[in-house]
Image: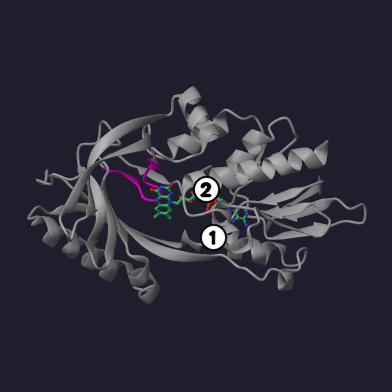
Amino acid sequence: MAGLSIAYNLREQNITLFDKSWRPGGRVSTRIHDNYCFDHGAHYLSVNHSVLQLKELINKLNIANEIEIDFATNFLKNKKTKKKIIIGKNGMNSIPKSIFENISLNNYFNTKIIKIEKNKQGAYTLFSEKEEFENFDYVLICIPYLQSKELSSNLIDFSKIIYEPSYDPIHTIMLSYKSKNNINLSGGLYLHRDVSFFMNQNLKFENLIDECWVLNMSSEYTKTNIDIDDKTLEKYAQTIFENAFKIKNEIRFIKSHRWLYAQTNISYNSLSKKYWINSKDNKIFLTGDWVLGKSLSDAWSAGEKLSHYIKNLLI
Ligand SMILES: Cc1cc2nc3c(=O)[nH]c(=O)nc-3n(C[C@H](O)[C@H](O)[C@H](O)COP(=O)(O)OP(=O)(O)OC[C@H]3O[C@@H](n4cnc5c(N)ncnc54)[C@H](O)[C@@H]3O)c2cc1C
């Protein structure tokens, strides 16, 4: 989202987008199969998020719905509320996908950048494992902080960066049932000490027949069980879920996914009051959700802020 925000805000410039993945959206990730669909990265946008530009763009492109759901603010303490959320039509990834399709830019997917070098003329060359891409005036790196640090350590003096943001990992579990369970909540927090979040997926995908759920393990649990094997983790999460809702039906599908850099724990801006990290020649910039916080709107805002600065540099 940070990269797309920049591509959108600097769309008059000649921009090339590189992504190691086969699709746009990063941690906004939707899996669609015949019987099951899951948003197993970002679940929704908060209705009261403060990013006007993202709101306007989503409305203009007509790519999301605002819905009201029954939500447990604390399942363990039996606290419930009606919650308004914004979800992508046909899953969350349809938001970045549509934004990407509406900006025309050179793009290379399945292209992981592994090295960046400055040439004698002062322009930058990007290297993937197979190819070189030459002659860039600016390189804007929009990936989790630790990965961007690794990628730019030959270009930015990180000994000068005293405040470093941090991330928490999250194990997510996708599970589905062929028969309907009798659950009167669409989602919530604190299902269990080790499961921090759960959300029904049928409210997002109209034609979904199976009952599908996504669970997020707590970051504390994930940190202490970072290398747990998939089967043990999946069984543990399933047992917690089924005990909480007294489920007797058999599952049709279960799969876990580990997000190493899931959520910002402490943002860069809260520590440094700065909005990006840059090289001495002001040509390499690092941004992402970690600059401002841990949400899609933070990622978008961080990209928007950096774009305004770059626009001024180009005048
Ligand atoms: C499980 C989970 C649940 C969440 N729930 C919510 C939620 O409900 N609401 C919400 O607002 N936010 C939520 N978030 C957070 C939200 O997803 C992120 O804040 C946001 O998507 C981050 O965007 P970004 O652009 O900063 O980074 P990313 O989404 O991580 O994007 C980075 C991109 O860079 C690419 N990349 C990385 N390295 C390279 C490389 N070397 N070369 C080329 N490309 C590279 C990646 O493929 C990716 O596309 C959740 C996150 C997770 C993991």
Give whichever of 188, 204 is nearer the camera. 188
Q: Quadrant of the C terminus?
A: top right
Q: Is residue 61 left or right of residue 113?
A: left
Proximity of marks 1 and 2: CB atoms separated by less than 8 Å:
yes
**Residue at 64% over, 29% down:** 104
Identify which amino acid the numbered label 1 is placed on. Answer: Ser
Q: State which tag comes first along the sequence, 1 or 2.
A: 1
48 w.r.t. 235: above or below: above
Q: Position of residue 197 (x, y in %)?
A: 29, 56
Q: Which residue is mark 1?
A: 267
167 w.r.t. 1: above or below: below
**Residue at 36% over, 50% down:** 40
Q: For mark 2, give the secondary structure.
A: helix
Q: Quadrant of the N terminus?
A: top right
The boundaries of the magenta stretch are 36-45
- Confirm or reject: label 2 Cβ below 8 Å from ligand 1: yes
Q: Position of residue 26 (x, y in %)?
A: 51, 49
